[in-house]
Image (tube, rainbow, N blue to C red):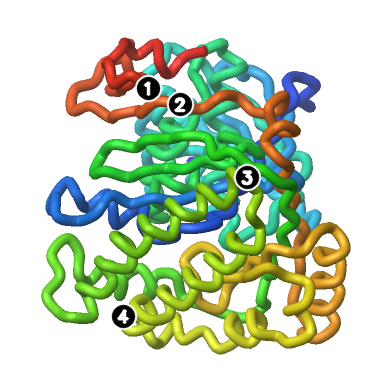
Amino acid sequence: MDIGVIASTGDPVTPITGLELFVCGRVCLFGEHSDWAGGFRSSNPDIAVGRTIVVGTSNYGLFARVSKHPNKLILTSTTDEGEQMGPFCIPMEPKALLKAAKKGGFWSYAAGVAYQMSVLFDIQGIQIDNYSTTLPIKKGLSSSAALCVLVARAFNQTYCLKLSIRGEMEFAYQGEILTPSKCGRMDQACAFGAQPVCLDYDGDQLHVEEVSVGEDMYFVIADLHASKDTVIILKDLQAGYPFPKTDVQRGVHKLLGEVNQDITSRASTCLAEGDLPSLGALMEEAQVEFDRYGGAACPSQLTAPMLHKVLKHKAIQVHIWGGKGVGSQGDGTAQFLCKGRAGQDAVCEILERDFPGLHALRLDVPATTELSELCPKVQGTVIPCESSSANNHGLMHATSSGSIVSAASLCK
């Protein structure tokens, strides 16, 4: 059977009645692009540590039922527009899975994660029915990373692998980078669900800490219904890494280094104190700095006329504390911090009325006290090691006290 085709009538798919899973997407509130920039510290230690503040799209995600299969990965999916895709069926054999991952396309993400699982664990196959999707696809909300986390979590819970959420995140990342879509480590932060987290990127090291939220927050995520080319954006911004050669490239280093560290540090304080007016002002400041340095490096994509037209739309200003671009920036998606539920409703109504084709999503981030019963505690640093084995997956863990403990840190 061709590893890249859907199942034939001679290879029936059994309806799933097993485990129910949900994985949300993620929004980068601050620090976009600094994840891959910080990764270059392995080659140039003069580059500043990258830092992002990320929150899950708790009301938008992937819903799935999963169960064991004796020897295959079988995946069916339903898009956010209701289109049913698959089933995609492939033997749980490393060579076949790796080939499918490198081929690219929607199914490659699942194949990449399944490959990582198959070479490190003594497991059989799995059947995943992604029967509902409320997360918009290709809108800067990490829909591909959500799928990777879903597959990692499905294997983890179905086969009782006892991986922690951070472990699931790592396997999802290692699976996605096998595909032609080269993501940064930030995207898999959707594994933490609704809990906002701060991630530091220091070469191959990733440090994750939860972020306190002192006040309920009401965001609007606006799909601008325009166009951008993320490949060009990444190519132009990364042109000066690891070693900048021009003033424009040094400006990008400054943007994703000292400027970003300052803004994310102040943003963490504002979040903890529930100071939403100041947080909104920081969103505006972050956009100004990105336009200044990022726009100079990639004017063809980051001039972003539609993004700036929507951000400055006069009718919404009374209802928002601030706004900025999302993800890779450009004319893709905008985010707004609104003045309460009423402000959120007003922004959605105004934007969809005044910009035909624009689609506005509501994202609620409750205060930490409301999150505490819903989200796991996040602490410590997971450090990918040069050596690996089937027992520790090449990972070690540094506790909050700085001590290194065993690979059980990836387990519950």
Compared with 133, 67 (above or below) is: above
How far is mark 1 from mark 2, CA to CA?
A: 7 Å
Kindly identify which numbered label has been placed on residue 379.
Answer: 2
Who is closer to the viewer here, 57 or 387? 57
Q: Amino acid at mark 2?
A: Gln
Query: Which sits earlier in the primary sequence, circle 2 or circle 4?
Result: 4
Q: Label 4's element?
A: helix
How far is mark 1 from mark 3, CA to CA?
A: 23 Å
Check disc 4 and report the residue beneath it.
297
**What is the x, y in percent for residue 404?**
27, 16
Whether label 2 touches label 4, CB < 8 Å: no
Using residue 384 as the reference point, say whether residue 183 is left or right of it. Answer: right
Q: Amino acid at mark 4?
A: Ala
Quadrant assignment, res 255:
bottom left
How far is mark 2 from mark 4, CA to CA?
A: 36 Å
How far is mark 3 from mark 2, CA to CA?
A: 17 Å
Q: Label 2's element?
A: loop
**Residue sitting at 60 percent across and 56 percent down?**
141
Who is closer to the viewer here, 320 or 155? 320
Q: Amino acid at mark 3?
A: Gly
Q: Amino acid at mark 1?
A: Ser
Who is closer to the viewer here, 376 or 18? 376
**What is the x, y in percent for residue 33?**
39, 60
Query: Which sits earlier in the primary sequence, circle 1 or circle 2?
Result: 2
Check disc 3 and report the residue beneath it.
56
How far is mark 4 from mark 1, CA to CA?
A: 38 Å
**What is the x, y in percent for residue 231?**
39, 70
Whether label 4 touches label 3, CB < 8 Å: no
Check disc 1 and report the residue beneath it.
400
Whether label 1 touches label 2, CB < 8 Å: yes
Using residue 390 as the reference point, say whether residue 166 is left or right of it. Answer: right
Badge nearest the viewer, 1 or 3: 1
